[in-house]
């Protein structure tokens, strides 16, 4: 069956282009002028409309050109149309369709071996992932893009991708790696005339920001000052406003009492208000909110709310979450209601996670298809010689045998693992029951004896002992309740929701999403139990240590995996596994039992984010 598919694919790849040539060439000889006139004229219209930034109209015309290219089987026009649709949608902040169109263009350029355009499409896709906060995905896509580009002809694109990677490392707080990639960009700038002056200033601005974050203030401030003194920077432009804002922030971080910093950021904000730069206003108001955060809570909240308003207008979910990270602690400090912000935070986080997952899936499927196609082509070449074919058959038999052996071993291991997990579960329940039945009953009997002794009850010490014993008894009951067998039938979802709700109260809001009926049916019994324990430990850890006022926890799944996303606005901790307590260690062990992966992301005073993924 596999050979038949490969043979069919071979004929498609060989015969379809020939058929297309037979169809196109006669039309070129007889009446090619109308076709080329159509594409030329519509191309000119698209460029004029796009230059005026009328992107909706440009999209409509480009879609018309795309349909024409499909009918005429014109690969180059089709690739160019996909590229334009990606660009116009990105300018409109329609990131999901933009990524999809860039991906379609990428597949065509890869198929026709245009490595420069292949790398260029991956650069655009990586930038979209970065904008959506998928930093790991952006880094992977950018590194893949670099593999297609060669200097000196592609130097400016290599610099752009290297800059993207530098920014990703900066956003991940890995400043040393960010500076290393910035150094690569600077070397490319020195030896190339193909990189525009404006791009160079952008790269230098990023470098200055990294230096400031590394607390190398003098170097960073000097670089910002050089950028502001550049004659090519237009007065009252978005570029000047960016440099002013960043210089003001750098001076403030170096010296919180520096009076010049507030003046510089005020000038930047005025320019951005004048030119109506929404993204710039988000940055300025965010910096002002941080500037006033410890000095003046009312001013800090005002700027945070302004940043949030602009983030909503821009419909940028990453910016919305970043501004909420300022609004929520400020409102909490000022004892203001957090209900609206808590709901918005959860909704935005869920929407962003879905978009990131969809975009990641688009690229993953494409990469898989391309890899599979390359493997099939290699197999076809190998089958040209009879000797190679025999070797392939022998190897296939060997691989199949190894696979069968591996599969049997894997099934045995999984069976042992399930047995061990069920044994652990049964043991825990038995121990809990023993604690309740023996320890709890003995203590209760002792309490009864103390209550029946009037003389002892008159002693203050007696009351203290009685109260302490009562607490011990309650704790024993709680242990038994905690280890009550978990229902893994159709009521599992309700059990999980009840568990989450039990941790909420007047000061802690628990937010989750409504799941469709049958959501949990695909999950095996033993994994339901492990997941229930993981959720319970996360929530217990939150109640004990985090001081959070709201918690968002959501579940998602694909055909092959289950995902859990947890967020709270608590006090957080140092993002180092060496500082984890027993609770998080417990969660880590449970995830390993599930053969899953996890990511704990926390910064002191900024809450905790946990992402857990495991196979179904």
Image: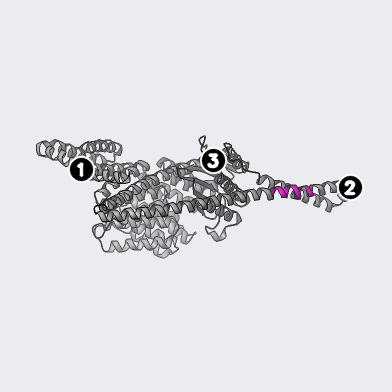
Q: Nearer the viewer, residue 602 or 252?
A: 602
Please say if the residues under marks 1 and 2 sit with CB atoms less than 8 Å apart: no
Left or right: where does residue 587 sit relative to residue 386? right
Mark 3 → mark 1, Cα distance in angstroms: 54 Å
- Indicate which disc, 3 or 2, sits on the residue closer to the N terminus: 2
Percent of width and height locating residue 382:
27, 54
| Sequence-first disc among 1 and 2 | 1
Disc marking residue 15: 1
On residue 512, the disc is 3
**Of labels 1 and 2, the one closer to you:** 1
Locate residue 225: give its quadrant. Answer: bottom left
| Residue 184, placed above or below residue 434 | below
Please name the colour scheme applied to the rendered image.
Answer: one colour
**Residue 247: x and y, percent?**
40, 57
Which mark, residue 423?
none
In the image, is residue 189 part of the stretch drawn in magenta? Answer: no
Taking the image as shown, residue 17 lies to the left or right of residue 347, namely: left
Secondary structure, magenta segment, majority class: helix
Where does label 2 land, which residue? 454
Q: Position of residue 69 (x, y in %)?
A: 22, 38
Which residues are drawn in magenta?
Answer: 432-442
């Amino acid at each position: 069956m596999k050979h038949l598919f490969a043979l069919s694919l071979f004929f498609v790849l060989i015969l379809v282009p020939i058929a297309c040539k037979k169809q196109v060439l006669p039309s070129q000889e007889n009446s090619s002028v109308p076709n080329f006139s159509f594409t030329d004229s519509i191309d000119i219209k698209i460029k004029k409309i796009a230059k005026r930034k009328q992107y909706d109209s440009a999209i409509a015309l480009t879609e018309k050109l795309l349909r024409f290219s499909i009918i005429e089987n014109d690969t180059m026009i089709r690739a160019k149309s996909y590229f334009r649709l990606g660009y116009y949608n990105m300018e409109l902040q329609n990131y999901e369709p933009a990524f999809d169109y860039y991906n379609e263009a990428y597949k065509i350029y890869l198929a026709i071996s245009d490595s420069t355009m292949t790398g260029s499409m991956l650069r655009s896709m990586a930038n979209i992932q970065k904008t959506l906060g998928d930093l790991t995905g952006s880094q992977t896509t950018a590194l893949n893009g670099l593999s297609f580009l060669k200097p000196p002809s592609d130097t400016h694109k290599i610099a752009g991708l290297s800059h993207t990677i530098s920014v990703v490392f900066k956003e991940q707080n890995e400043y040393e790696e960010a500076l290393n990639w910035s150094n690569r960009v600077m070397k490319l700038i020195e030896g190339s005339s193909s990189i525009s002056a404006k791009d160079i200033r952008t790269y230098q601005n990023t470098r200055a920001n990294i230096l400031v974050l590394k607390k190398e203030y003098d170097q960073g401030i000097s670089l910002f000052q050089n950028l502001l003194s550049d004659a090519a920077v237009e007065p009252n432009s978005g570029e000047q406003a960016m440099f002013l804002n960043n210089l003001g922030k750098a001076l403030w971080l170096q010296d919180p009492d520096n009076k010049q910093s507030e003046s510089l950021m005020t000038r930047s904000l005025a320019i951005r208000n004048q030119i109506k730069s929404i993204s710039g206003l988000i940055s300025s108001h965010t910096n002002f909110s941080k500037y006033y955060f410890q000095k003046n809570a009312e001013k800090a909240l005002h700027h945070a709310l302004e940043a949030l308003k602009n983030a909503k207008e821009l419909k940028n979910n990453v910016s919305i979450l970043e501004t909420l990270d300022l609004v929520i602690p400020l409102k909490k400090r000022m004892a203001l209601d957090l209900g609206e912000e808590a709901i918005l935070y959860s909704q935005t986080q869920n929407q962003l996670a879905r978009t990131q997952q969809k975009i990641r899936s688009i690229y993953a499927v494409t990469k898989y298809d391309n890899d599979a196609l390359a493997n099939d082509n290699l197999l076809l070449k190998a089958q040209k010689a009879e000797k190679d074919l025999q070797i392939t058959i022998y190897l296939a038999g060997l691989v199949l045998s190894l696979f069968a052996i591996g599969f049997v071993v894997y099934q045995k291991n999984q069976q042992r693992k399930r047995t061990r997990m069920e044994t652990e579960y049964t043991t825990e329940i038995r121990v809990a029951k023993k604690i309740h039945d023996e320890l709890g009953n003995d203590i209760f009997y002792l309490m009864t004896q103390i209550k029946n002794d009037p003389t002892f009850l008159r002693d203050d010490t007696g009351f203290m002992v009685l109260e302490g014993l009562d607490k011990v008894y309650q704790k024993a009951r709680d242990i038994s309740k905690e280890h009550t067998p978990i229902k893994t039938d159709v009521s599992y979802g309700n059990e999980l929701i009840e568990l989450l709700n039990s941790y909420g109260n007047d000061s802690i809001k628990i937010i989750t999403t409504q799941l469709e009926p049958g959501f949990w049916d695909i999950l095996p019994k033993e994994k339901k139990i492990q997941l229930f324990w993981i959720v319970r430990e996360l929530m217990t850890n939150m109640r004990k240590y985090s001081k959070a006022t709201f918690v968002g926890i959501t579940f998602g799944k694909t055909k092959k995996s289950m995902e859990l996303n947890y967020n709270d606005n608590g006090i957080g901790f140092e993002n180092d596994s060496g500082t984890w307590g027993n609770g998080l260690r417990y969660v880590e062990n449970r995830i390993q039992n599930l053969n899953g992966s996890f990511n704990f992301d926390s910064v002191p005073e900024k809450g905790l984010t946990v992402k857990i993924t495991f196979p179904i």
